[in-house]
Image: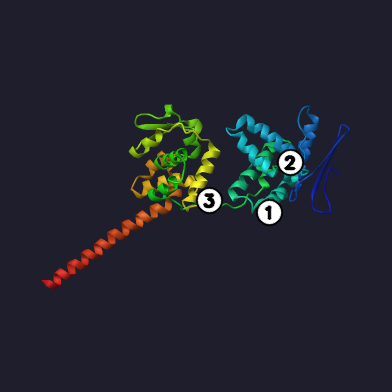
């Protein structure tokens, strides 16, 4: 029998070819068609020298393979390694077919210790490791597709007024203070600010190099008058961790511990839209991939502007009619 179902409902595939026996257990929920396809792949692989036989390798091996891939392909392999190391202990002794259960256990054990977004990034490394293994035909199934990330609630309506930004900046060191105001006046991300050099600062604009942006596209940001004094401190003599720690202390001392550095970028966009700046212009400044992204993130502000416009229009008409009615009575 080449494939069968055990007492637990799992499908097995056993192939004996040229004196070599290969036995694989499919993940729960696999169909007869899945078993037959796997059998065909195994027979084909055994018949071709150098072709790997699909299997159920250890998760630690797949993660190691992915990290090797990341070091050669990703812009920030250290970030991938950091997130992979966080979940490393849960991968020991477990195989690819157990990935879904492993992911659920990780969420249960670490859910109270890390933010959802942080935990999802770690799960993302596991998904990519499994997908890479599937692409290389190292597994019998794309187990990465079975991993469900925890639900994120990323929508933040937090934005700061100039007065609030000043309150935080006044509690910071000179280097952190410069980063805070540069973020507000340019909408730049933390990494983009830390990567700025004197050569990037022109007479009227700043060039954000593509290698330092999220989209890998060059962006030009005009220099407004209040920004010039802070650009004198570029390049900033502080690293990522230094800025992270310095901003955390400043926001706590200012009585706003819930504020994040990214809220400064969001505040830049919000203040521009409230001032009547077109969404297209805001999108270009912030370096969004499209105006649709900007519209989605600032939709609530657009609705508020439309509401204000409607109220102003119809309130004006109502008052006008009342005035006309009183004039007729006096006549």
Tag 1's secondary structure?
Answer: helix
Relative to 219, does residue 143 appear above or below in the rendering? below
- Residue position for label 2: 59
Residue 135: in sight, yes or no?
no
Report crowding for label 3: few under 14, some 14 to 19, many 20 or more residues within 10 A (C-alpha).
Answer: few
Residue 158 seen anywhere in this rendered image of the structure: yes
Which quadrant of the structure image shows residue 181? top left
Front-most of residues 24 and 228 = 228
Give the spatial CA distance, label 2 vs label 1: 19 Å
The answer to whether residue 85 is left or right of residue 191 is right
Residue 118 x %, y % = 60, 46
Q: Position of residue 104 (x, y in %)?
A: 69, 51
Q: Closer to the observer: label 2 or label 1?
A: 1
Q: Residue at x 38, y 50 (%)?
A: 163
Mark 3 / mark 2, whichever is N-terminal? 2
User: Residue 284: horizontal and vertical position, in percent?
Assistant: 41, 39
Spatial separation of the CA atoms under disc 3 and disc 1? 20 Å
Task: Choose top left, top right, bottom left or bottom right for residue 300.
Answer: bottom left
Give the residue number, with chain letter if any, for mark 3.
154
Q: Which mark is residue 108?
A: 1
Q: Nearer the viewer, residue 154 or 329?
A: 154
């Amino acid at each position: 029998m080449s494939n069968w179902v055990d007492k637990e409902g799992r499908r097995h595939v056993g192939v004996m070819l040229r004196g070599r026996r290969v036995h694989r257990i499919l993940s729960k929920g696999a169909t007869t068609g899945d078993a037959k396809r796997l059998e065909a792949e195994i027979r084909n692989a055994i018949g071709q020298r150098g072709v790997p036989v699909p299997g159920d390798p250890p998760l630690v091996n797949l993660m190691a393979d992915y990290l090797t891939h990341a070091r050669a392909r990703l812009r920030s392999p250290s970030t991938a390694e950091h997130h992979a190391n966080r979940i490393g202990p849960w991968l020991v002794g477990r195989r690819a077919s157990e990935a879904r259960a492993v992911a659920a256990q990780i969420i249960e054990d670490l859910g109270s210790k890390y933010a959802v977004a942080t935990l999802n990034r770690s799960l993302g490394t596991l998904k990519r490791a499994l997908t890479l293994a599937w692409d290389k035909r190292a597994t019998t199934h794309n187990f990465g597709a079975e991993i469900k990330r925890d639900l994120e609630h990323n929508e933040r309506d937090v934005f700061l007024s100039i007065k609030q930004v000043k309150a935080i900046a006044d509690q910071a060191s000179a280097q952190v203070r410069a980063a805070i105001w540069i973020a507000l006046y340019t909408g730049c991300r933390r990494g983009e600010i830390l990567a700025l050099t004197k050569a990037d600062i022109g007479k009227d604009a700043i060039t954000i190099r593509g290698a330092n942006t999220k989209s890998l596209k060059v962006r030009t940001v005009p220099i407004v008058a209040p920004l010039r004094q802070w650009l004198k401190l570029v390049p900033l003599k502080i690293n990522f961790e230094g800025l992270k720690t310095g901003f955390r202390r400043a926001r706590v001392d200012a009585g706003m511990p819930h504020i994040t550095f990214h809220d400064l970028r969001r505040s830049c966009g919000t203040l521009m839209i409230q001032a009547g700046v077109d969404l297209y212009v805001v999108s270009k400044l912030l370096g969004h991939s499209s105006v649709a992204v900007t519209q989605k993130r600032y939709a609530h502000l657009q609705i508020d502007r439309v509401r204000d416009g409607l109220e102003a229009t119809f309130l004006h008409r109502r008052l006008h009619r009342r005035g006309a009615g009183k004039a007729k009575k006096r006549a």
